[in-house]
Image (cartoon, coloured by chain):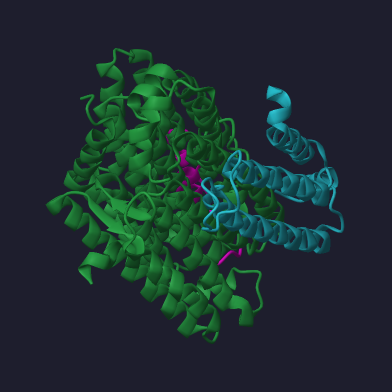
Amino acid sequence: MIAHLPALQVVIPLISAPLCALLPAGRPAWLAAMAASWLAFLIAALLLYQVLAHGPISYLMGGWPIPWGIEYRVDALNAYMLLIVAAIGAAVASFGRTIVEQRLSLPLNKHPWFYTAYLLCLTGLLGITVTGDAFNVFVFLEISALSSYVLISVGRDRRALVAAYQYLIMGTVGATFILIGIGLLYVMTGTLNMGDLAARLPAVSGTRTVRAAFAFLTVGTAIKLALFPLHLWLPNAYAYAPSPVTAFLAATATKVAIYVMLRFFFTVFGVKFSFETMQLDKILLPLSLVGIASASLVAIFQTNVKRMLAYSSVAQIGYMMLGVSLVSVTGLTASISHLFNHALMKGTLFMALGCVSYRVGATRLERMAGVGRSMPWTMGAFVIGGLSLIGVPLTAGFVSKWYLIVGALEKGWWPVAALVLATSLLAVIYIGRVVEVAYFKPAPEGQRVEEAPLALLVPTWALALANLYFGLETSLNVGVARLAAQGLLGATP
Amino acid sequence: MQILGHFNYWIFIVLMMCGFYMVIASDNLIKKLVGLSIFQTSVFILYISMGKIIGGTAPIVIDKAAVYSNPLPHVLILTAIVVGVATTSLGLALVVRIQEAYGTIEADEILAQDRDDSP
């Protein structure tokens, strides 16, 4: 059983997905989805424990030897990503059932299909992370992408449909670019296994085909992870999707795309080719800096709080790519630990917003007036998530920003470090606007708002407390991230 | 000879660019999907061309043949074709819902309607 954990990680949500569709609407379908998500979380935790204790795991699908069969390979980075995805998956699945279903634009008898799409999305994201086969990455990428289009389109606002359509177009173009890149790599090496690719690529790395493959993979993953200026699909998709879906996608989908990029650049192409021959860091650095600054500025002027947080996500992705462009252990540690911490903070913020939109019926800023007094617990979680987003000490967000600044200073790039600090102040402004309206503006006449029900508050607060916990006890989020960063940089210390 | 010999790769590039241009340039949501389909199909041609080996026969073990074409890219692309079908059908389903909700499938008219709505 233990030996088959890497396969079960993907197979359990995959099998449960059609099962959900067959179950009667209401409690059974939800329970099945929740059981599958929690099992996935348990497996991810066990895998991480095994990897930390005994080193990387290699699992051969169906027992086929490596260059022919599909290998599932779990090292510190994979196991860490699996834990992030599965933990957020479990937290979001625990979000109260009746409340989630109320916010869908689906008839009652179609509700089980929502959980099917959700589990398929989870399957795809876990599959991308666990697999060691380049083509397998594409297949799982499309499984997660197609189901996330469906999840976004069931939002109640009709703009959710257009947002899902735009995401479908952009996402498919991105995935097809990745497919072309993988195809060109296969032409040159005759293998799809990532370890095998890494071994064979140096011999042919001077060819134009490999460079073209590199370019296609760069642009493809950049669309998927919403790197500025390819982020245009993201704000609408996050703003109009149902709140739990937003929380799930914001915390996991773009992170997994970043993982794919890291895996291809560092493991498959190798540090030398990606950053010395192709000089990728020279492109990533300006794009991430412009992305951080512009998206933070745009976030300040949003009137829809969900949309504001979506723009803030684009800025946060910039921080992660900034860490990558430093190409040092400290920089990568910052990036990888920010994957974890950002999942926690955005999960908390979007789930708190879900509570607000359940009681108030909207996430427009002016409608949130006085909510701080009528929903103290919800807004308490929001404030913790917000502080973590800004990077206040004692929260998880502080830890990764600290490493990012240290990484920039190690290189002597003090203007970059200054920009990180300055843009954190922009985050103070946009989170501050929400706090001001919620706590200091009087509630409109006649509006009666109650505290959110416990079924929503428990998962929201679980994530909020995790923000505080991982701000103090960093052996998991930073310790494993450092291990993963060292693994990625390999020989070059 | 070099250019003619790479005939199918040229087709791949032309189709890819046509499809990609349609996705970017057209305002009609259906036409965008048509472009997307052409774009994806061009990649299928790339993969299938990759499997061909000059002088190779169909990959069935027989006594006379020494060189076989590579069947793996064909198998891979079957998966990608399925993905393409799923993407197109989901896209079309979304367009139907958009038509019901907005009464139009022109991107600029949808944008204009959204601007009139309260954000």
Give percent across and percent down for residue A484.
Answer: 25, 40
Residue B54 falls inside the magenta stretch:
no
At horizontal 51% and vertical 85% (from top left) the residue drawn is A23
Range covered by the magenta-colored residues: A428-449
At horizontal 65% and vertical 43% (from top left) the residue drawn is B43
Residue at the far bottom: name it: A24
Where is residue B54, by image quadrant?
top right
A72 and A125: which is toward the camera: A72
B24 and B51: which is toward the camera: B51
Give percent across and percent down for residue A300.
Answer: 55, 35
Where is residue A428, by image quadrant?
top left
- The quadrant of the rendering that contains the N terminus of chain A is bottom left
Q: Can residue A154 be seen in this view?
A: yes
Residue at the far front: name it: B64
Q: Can residue A325 be seen in this view?
A: no
- Please state if A46 lies on the left or on the right of A192 as rendered: left
* Chain B: drawing colour: cyan
A385 and B67: which is toward the camera: B67
Residue at the far left: name it: A53
Q: Is residue A92 above or below residue A159?
A: below
- The quadrant of the rendering that contains the C terminus of chain A is top left
B106 and A472: which is toward the camera: B106
Q: How many marks?
A: 0
- Please state if B24 lies on the left or on the right of A179 as rendered: right
Give percent across and percent down for residue B29.
Answer: 80, 49
Q: In this view, does A362 lie above or below A484?
A: below
Chain letter for green, please: A
Residue A429 falls inside the magenta stretch:
yes
At horizontal 35% and vertical 62% (from top left) the residue drawn is A61
Give percent across and percent down for residue B28.
Answer: 84, 47
